[in-house]
Amino acid sequence: MSYKALYRIYRPASFDEVAGQKHITQTLKNALKNDRVAHAYLFSGPRGTGKTSIAKIFAKAVNCEKSPIENPCNVCENCLGISDNSISDVIEIDAASNNGVDEIRELRDKVKYLPGYVKYKVYIIDEVHMLSTGAFNALLKTLEEPPQHVIFILCTTEPQKIPATIHSRCQRFDFKSISNADIIDKLFEIAEEENIEITEEAVKQMANYAEGGLRDAISLLDQVYAYSPKSIDVDDVNEICGTVSVVKLIEMVDSIVKKEPARAIKLLGDLISEGKEIKKITLDLIDFFKNVLVYKNLNKLNEFSIYDSLDEFKSFAKELSSHRLFMILDVLNQTLNEMNWSGQAKTYLELAFLKMTDQETSDSEAMFEKIDELKNRIAYLENNRNESVKFIPSSNEVKADEYKKEIIKPAVKVKEDVQEDQTIEEKEEKEITKVDPKKDEFEKPSTKEKIKEDMCGDISNTYDIAFVEEILNNGDVKDRMYLNDEWQGFERGLVDKDEKYLASLFETGKVVASKKNKIIVTFSSATICNKLMVPDNKDVIKRSLYNKFNRDMDYMALPTNVFEDITNEFKEHYLKGEKDIKLSRIYCEGLKDVSNMKSGTEEREAKIVSDAKNIFGDLVRIKE
């Protein structure tokens, strides 16, 4: 075969030519120069990072006619013979195909013979983690005390599979992934030597696809050059790698951003007809939206990214909210996982397009944006409560030139009557800025609580803060610890299937506060809390508590995050030395007033009765 692959032509011949592994090459150069060569080395790291290349350079250096020397001369007979594999004293073994105990025993028997041409026999065992347990055991003694003329270099991509007994007998060097900067420099160097015309974007894309493997990057350059020998651009690289071109990718992203699922699905069909792999399309979308999110939050990208110079990319970063970007990435990641377990990859990605462009999703995004806006307004009001503050509307509500009066002078006292031509907003402003003559500061409006109540509703009939206040003000730590230690076995004494289910559900909670006859139990979700706080279900649980602990106990089920907020507020009051602490009402999106709800069993029974009456009329009689 006359043609030689580029990665073989440009394999480094000295330590100075190795890219990205200076911490290793410098150590080995010092050891060679000072004649402190060990008998066994372990090279571990990702593929294509220079493990075997450095092993061969090391083998040449220790056997160079000018040794001790930190770099092989590459001109003496020994160096040239090792380079062209004509000297049999440097032996490369593939452990993937020679992993049995018999092969290692044969190696062990040959080790004792002196080298025929050079000073040291060097055994380079590649993919050493593939050796069997018996083969490793056969190698142990030889590896610990080899003859003086033998050096072992073990190379692996999975060091965790190598026994500790082997580790302890070797000097270990961990190879790191090659940086994009080093890969790009090497590719440009090769392109210049081979007279290959290539764009900067194409080189950056190759470096990204290589994922830290220089050999992969050079092989990709070789392949793309064969595809487009005249000149190479980023589209040629994408075509060879089976990925979506930047233009098509931006078009697909634009259809998602503008909520046009039909257009996105059509573009997907076009790409599939071109031979693109669906999983690769999904990965490209994930990478693109991830970069948009990074740019939106950091206002910059990796200097080797191909997206940084695209105006469309920057416009997406401005237009999309962080909430929507996280939602899109969650949907795509979930879709990618589902593809791995199904043969319907196209269907899953089409459903993902529909989900990402769904109107309900847009409504939830608008809700999140509104919540953020309300939070900012509340914080603004609290930080400036010593001034008369006029709220600045968001850009979605009014144009920028319609509000230039942001903050007016501090008010001393407001007595003026509201004029008829005043707007509702001005009236509300005056209400906020009124001053109590008996106080030095403004009345603190209950805006924050009102917003929460509007969002979550009044749930005090079910989740009464007085219940929590009574327990926290009179808590019994020892009883709480005792209850948690014994917090199992609530199903005992229960026969009904639904009651057993409730008891097992209750066991998933954790007692966070106790007052002997009243306890607070936290759960992972609001849905569980609502179910356990239905009156009929509470009766079942309270009966189980009595059977378990032989005492009457009432309880409140709360989500973990809600109780954390309550305890933080309680601590603030407690550290101020307050007694009989009063807390804010409980609000939580997801918690509901279930004080008038019936259990699922009763609802089903009631439905059966109503259906029977509809069918049979007055013939139905309810038997107690």
Image (tube, rainbow, N blue to C red):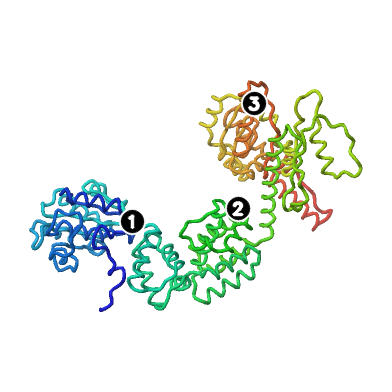
Return the residue nearer the eye: 347 or 304. 304
- What is the crowding at mark 2: few (fewer than 14 residues within 10 Å), some, or many (at least 20)? some
Q: Residue furthest right?
A: 420
Q: Quadrant of residue 588?
A: top right
Question: Quarter holding the C terminus?
Answer: top right
Return the residue nearer the eye: 145 or 467. 145
Calculate the distance from the C-alpha at mark 3 to the C-alpha at mark 1: 57 Å
What secondary structure is marked by label 1?
loop
Residue lying at 58% horizontally and 37% vertically, measured from the top left = 493
Relative to 131, is 65 on the left or the right?
A: left
In percent of width and height, residue 229 lies at 39, 78
Q: Quadrant of residue 130?
A: bottom left
Q: Which mark, by number, is residue 169? A: none
Q: Which residue is mark 3?
A: 573
Relative to 244, is 181 on the left or the right?
A: left
Q: Which residue is mark 1?
A: 20
Residue lying at 63% horizontally and 23% vertically, measured from the top left = 576
Single out the mark in the foreground, 2 or 1: 1
Single out the mark in the foreground, 3 or 1: 1
Residue lying at 62% horizontally and 40% vertically, measured from the top left = 559
Q: Which residue is mark 2?
A: 322
Q: Is residue 618 above or below residue 481?
A: below
What secondary structure is marked by label 3?
helix
What secondary structure is marked by label 2?
helix
Q: Looking at the image, is mark 3 or mark 1 earlier in the sequence?
A: 1
Q: Looking at the image, is mark 2 or mark 3 earlier in the sequence?
A: 2
**As shown in the figure, which amino acid type bears the numbered disc 3?**
His
In percent of width and height, residue 611 lies at 77, 55
Q: Is residue 394 above or below residue 572?
A: below
Tell whether label 3 touches label 2 (CB within 8 Å).
no
Q: Looking at the image, is mark 2 or mark 1 earlier in the sequence?
A: 1
